[in-house]
Amino acid sequence: MTSTYAERAARHGAHGDAERRRSRLVSWLRLATILPGLAALVWGLAHVAHGGLPAVAAGIVLLLAYGGLVVWHARIEDRAAWFDALRLVNERALARTERRWDALPPAEAPPSIDLPHHPYALDLDLFGRASLFQFLGPAATPQGRGTLARWLVGPAPPAEILERQGAVLELAARHEWRERLAAHGVLAGDIRRAEIDPFLEWAEGPNPFPRSRVALQVLAIVLPLTTCILLALFFADVMDAAVWLIPLTIGIVLSFVTSKTIAHEFDRAGVGQYGLSRYAHLFRHATGEPFDAPPLGAIRERLGAEGRAAPLCMARLNTILSFAAFRYSAALLHFPVQALTLWDFHWLFALDRWRARAGRHVRDWMDALGEIDALAALACIKHDNPDWAMPDIDPQLSLAATALGHPLLPAERRVANDVEVGPPGTLLLVTGSNMSGKSTLLRAVGLNTVMAQAGGCVCASRLRMPPSDLQTSIRVQDSLELGLSYFMAALARLKGVVDASEHERPGRVLVYLLDEILQGTNSVERGIAVRAVAGHLLDAGAIGAMTTHDLALAGEEPLKGAARLVHFTELVDDDGAMWFDYRLRDGLATSRNALRLMSLIGISRQ
């Protein structure tokens, strides 16, 4: 994949450079036509009586050529921007495959997610630098990023996971489609909530004249028609009195009375629509071709209203607002046109008809676009890692993985292990020396569980797991703001895990991952606490894994009868150098390396 992305980035970059060279040439041609054209036109007009007509004709031809060059130049600039977007998409994909985190956009959690109190987001590095969210992204749109984030922090039901898997597999095979979706997202840029919210509020809101709407519609037709008929009769000398001034005056008064409300409606629709119009290509791309997977077909159906696709609805709205903008773009002409035709009323009613037919669908369009964007992000990972498996969500209450690895580690550094967690009444007890891979194993289990229940592939050759609610205690931090010591923070996190195990979850199982719990206290009290927590979780039917340096715990109940023992170890070569192979082995760890690590960094024993 690395070479493919590098080649595509180079090719798109070369096309973009060629378009920019063409753009510079056309810029010079524009200059070479506008200046001589204006000069010829001015000179010819000044000497029209003395043979200046050929100069006038030449000036007109040059100015027409300039107009054509302006249109051509705009298209060249659009193509250059398109190739730049495609290049950036492939450069980001290359950075993702190489795990070059600084070359990827930031991946902070949305404000709606309460990270400090989430049961696993902080421990598993779901957000931030070198996180799962950064690895899966960037999604093409803010809605896609929000949807993907929600999928990571909240597992989907099994049926929905299966449907997402089908969509992910279909999109994984459509590399060109995904690349273009991402490029359209780059060109659209981020749309702030402040740009969209007023438009959604307008689109889902009521008519500005709920009680007088019918009367205004009748007057908007009757008054101009009456004015025109009476005016024609007046100029045809059929009638002497200027009776046509009566309906004209009524229309002018009506326009002044309603002007503020109508202008407010046009502004509310126009400001948000400008931001939404930047997504026109994304809507068109998402609805441009059929899909086989049911979720993708359903999303395509949602991107429309009353049989019209979202791009056509948006084009209709653009047309309405462009005519409504006549009051601003041609203010001097607007007054007589408004007086004679009640122009603003007709486009206000057209806008209201659009809102009645399509307005209530706009929010769902954005949600649907976010869903297909999130599915495309998951599909990118499957495309880039064809050997990663789609997990089996099995109601059997155990988690079993073959060749499970940490998805955020590059392939050359990743070591895969076979792991089994469960069934209920058992736990996986992981022992081993410092730096041997215990915490990494827990995070690998957790991250793959998250990816599986989001609907994506997993970093394993096979994974079978039950529908799970995940709880972790891996990275515990003290808090000056909350006045919590490390020990109290660890206790609070453990309480969250224990409390979660007491909740009924029909058809689901609690999966816990606990790393060196309560390591900030003495070994006697820690042992008592670990045994109490383990007993509670075992009795509750939860499944999970724990790591510990305290080997004595394995020989005491409840761990003695329930724990399946595995360990990591360090290796020492003939020269005394220590290294790790990160291979999971059965049984209890038999070595410690703290003193050897001290000597390696120059701290000698006294």
Image: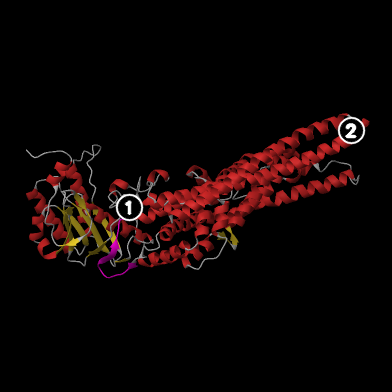
Residue 340 in the image, given as x and y percentages of width and height: 76, 43
Q: Residues within 10 Å of mark 1 (few under 14, many from 20)?
A: some
Say which residue appears at 35% left-offset and 58% top-offset. Answer: 451
Say which residue appears at 68% left-offset and 51% top-offset. Answer: 217
Nearer to the camera, 528 or 379: 379
Residue 580 in the image, given as x and y percentages of width and height: 21, 53
Q: Quadrant of residue 343?
A: top right
Locate the N terminus by quadrant. bottom left
Label 2 belongs to which residue? Answer: 52
Residue type, label 2: Gly
Visible residue check, residue 330 = no
Q: Nearer the viewer, mark 2 or mark 1?
A: 1
Locate the C terminus by quadrant. top left
Asked whether, in this view, residue 334 is left or right of residue 11, the answer is right
Asked whether, in this view, residue 75 is left or right of residue 558, the answer is right
Marks 2 and 1 sit apart, C-alpha to C-alpha, by 76 Å
Residue 48 within the magenta-colored segment of the rendering = no
Q: Residues within 10 Å of mark 2 (few under 14, many from 20)?
A: some
Visible residue check, residue 85 = yes
Which mark sits nearer the N-terminus, 2 or 1?
Answer: 2
Helix, strand or loop under label 1: loop
Establish if 334 lies above or below 553. Answer: above
**Extreme-front residue of the structure:** 574
Residue 164 in the image, given as x and y percentages of width and height: 42, 64
Residue 406 within the magenta-colored segment of the rendering = yes
Q: Which residues are magenta?
A: 392-408
Helix, strand or loop under label 2: loop
Label 1 belongs to which residue? Answer: 409
* Residue 574: assigned label: none
